[in-house]
Image: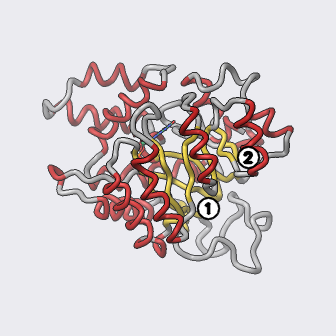
Amino acid sequence: REWCVALPKVELHAHLNGSVRDSTLLELAKQLGDRGVIVFEDVKDVIMKNGRSLPECFKLFDLFHILTTDHDTVTRITKEVVGDFAAENVVYLEIRTTPKNNEAKGMTKRSYMNAVLKGLKAVEDVDAVLFDSILRPDETLSRTPVGDLDGVTKKKKIYVRLLLSIDRRETTSAALDTVNLAMEMKDQGVVGIDLSGNPVVGEWETYLPALEHAKELGIPITIHCGEVPNRKEIQAVLDFCPQRLGHVCCLNDEEWKKLKSSMIPVEICLTSNVMTGGAPSLELHHFADLYNAKHPLSLCTDDSGLFSTSLSNES
Ligand code: 5GP
């Protein structure tokens, strides 16, 4: 375990609001409880519960969003989440989040993302590198692992990039807004688009225009695929051929074949899949089959707060 913590790691699939510390959620819930917005005792039990089904997770995200969706809190959780990943020696982090419009809070998708950027700049004790190139020509990750001290600042370094998520509950127009925002922010650390949200909600045809627009603009795309056995959508996603896929749990023989020949890299979320029933157990997880087939894979946390895991634990 210590070896896994010390290892410089890459995290490619982490949802911002799913990676928040329990202690922060409890503190935020307490504040809202004191103001009579929620009943703290009820919320506390929900936050501390272990083991959750997929539908329970999405109910919980709605609660998390009540706790976290104001500009200052978005800034705070971004700062904490990046700090937590850096503390366990993640050297390259792609954090994904759904830009949110919230009229009551005076929030637009753009102002939400500005709050995220503010959080990235406020990360303490760590040099969170957002804008410059990932590696200088004279620098390689093996020469500069985290834990390696920067000569001047003596700070750990973490390279952070952002993916903007489209929530499956969104309309075509809202999804297009997110893609255009990603384009607008491509010089501010945004490197791609993600499609996520409750897999039993929404239709592929609703997001397709936005995903095609992203493709036309040359924005890389990652898609949550096969969390539930939706044959039609799995086919459509594989045919769309995004740059990466998340999860790929419920594929049939033909779809596995198609995935393997496509060589589309897969973001593997072991704990998440076992906890939410996407895989029957760690031993029977599809990771082994894809690994043995030499398919490009990356181990990821998905929601380290929600599933009480870490990238060291997943490794
Ligand atoms: P946020 O985008 O608000 O920062 O992070 C939470 C959101 O990420 C959730 O509301 C949901 O849309 C998405 N999400 C987090 N974990 C999962 C997952 O395991 N599967 C899917 N499909 N979406 C997820």
Q: Is residue 83 above or below residue 152?
A: above
User: Hey, what amino acid is under mark 2?
Assistant: Leu
* Count of numbered circles on the image: 2
Q: Is residue 104 above or below residue 38?
A: below
Residue at x-position 69% and y-position 20%: 281
The verdict on label 1 being within 8 Å of ligand 1 is: no
User: Hey, what amino acid is under mark 1?
Assistant: Lys
Question: Circle 1 sits on which residue?
Answer: 156
Residue 172 has which mark? none
Tag 2 and tag 1, C-beta contact below 8 Å: no
Question: Circle 2 sits on which residue?
Answer: 297
Tell whether 261 sits left or right of 96: right
Is label 2 or label 1 in front?
Answer: 2
* Residue closest to the eye, 160 or 148: 160
The C terminus, quarter of image: top right
- Marks 2 and 1 sit apart, C-alpha to C-alpha, by 26 Å
